[in-house]
Amino acid sequence: MLDGVRRVRLMLDTAGLPESARPQGLSAIGGTRFVLVELNAVEKRYRVVLEVLEDGLPVTEVAMRHGVSRQTVHTWLRRCRESGMAGLVDRSRRPARCAHQISAEMERMVCDLHRRNPRWGPLVS
């Protein structure tokens, strides 16, 4: 972990690129060039799931290592089982419905009353 961001090494072939076009931060290790790249949220979640499922690590340990709760790891495991990697994509936090919204029938009745009695309620132009 570097500065709270999980990073992974990717092999990058820079042969034939001029020095100015090469990405910064490259280091040669055994003749192979590597660059550090940030993982996106889905990739991070997938790695967490793999640590539990494939490596057999306890959920508590994996959760502490990645700075999330046990419940979050269990949620990711369930979503991954149900939908694969697509289940690990961020979901909308928008509520499914507005709790204080009136029904369409009630709205229709209010509009009818206002049309029949234009002086009731706010003036609408």
Image (spheres, rainbow, N blue to C red):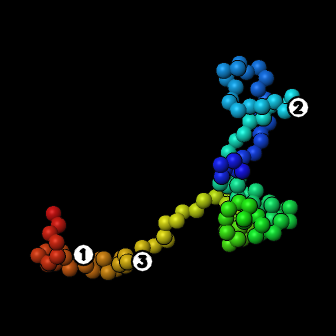
Q: Is residue 90 left or right of residue 48?
A: left
Which of marks 2 and 3 precedes in the sequence? 2
Q: Quadrant of the C terminus?
A: bottom left
Contact? badges 1 and 3 (CB < 8 Å):
no
**Identity of the residue drawn at 30% across and 77% down:** 107
Structural crowding at the residue carrying mark 2, measured as other residues with C-alpha within 10 Å and reported as few (<14), some (14–19) or many (≥20): few
Instruction: Classify mark 2: helix, strand or loop.
Output: loop
The image quadrant of residue 92 is: bottom right
Residue marked by disc 1: 111
Percent position (x, y) of residue 6? 70, 50
Q: Is residue 4 above or below residue 68?
A: above
Q: Amino acid at mark 3?
A: Ala
Q: Amino acid at mark 2?
A: Gly
Residue marked by disc 3: 99
Contact? badges 3 and 2 (CB < 8 Å):
no
Contact? badges 1 and 2 (CB < 8 Å):
no
Residue marked by disc 2: 30
**Identity of the residue drawn at 72% across and 39% down:** 36
Instruction: Classify mark 3: helix, strand or loop.
Output: loop
Give the camera-side residue of 25 and 47: 25
Percent position (x, y) of residue 9? 77, 41
Which of marks 2 and 1 precedes in the sequence? 2
Structural crowding at the residue carrying mark 3, measured as other residues with C-alpha within 10 Å and reported as few (<14), some (14–19) or many (≥20): few
Which of marks 3 and 1 precedes in the sequence? 3
Q: Is residue 62 above or below residue 24?
A: below
Which callout, 3 or 2, points to the residue nearer the camera?
A: 2
Percent position (x, y) of residue 22? 70, 25
Q: List the single residue furthest toward the left.
A: 119
Instruction: Classify mark 1: helix, strand or loop.
Output: helix
Measure the alpha-carbon separation of dots 3 and 2. 62 Å
Give the camera-side residue of 118 and 33: 33
Q: Amino acid at mark 1?
A: Cys
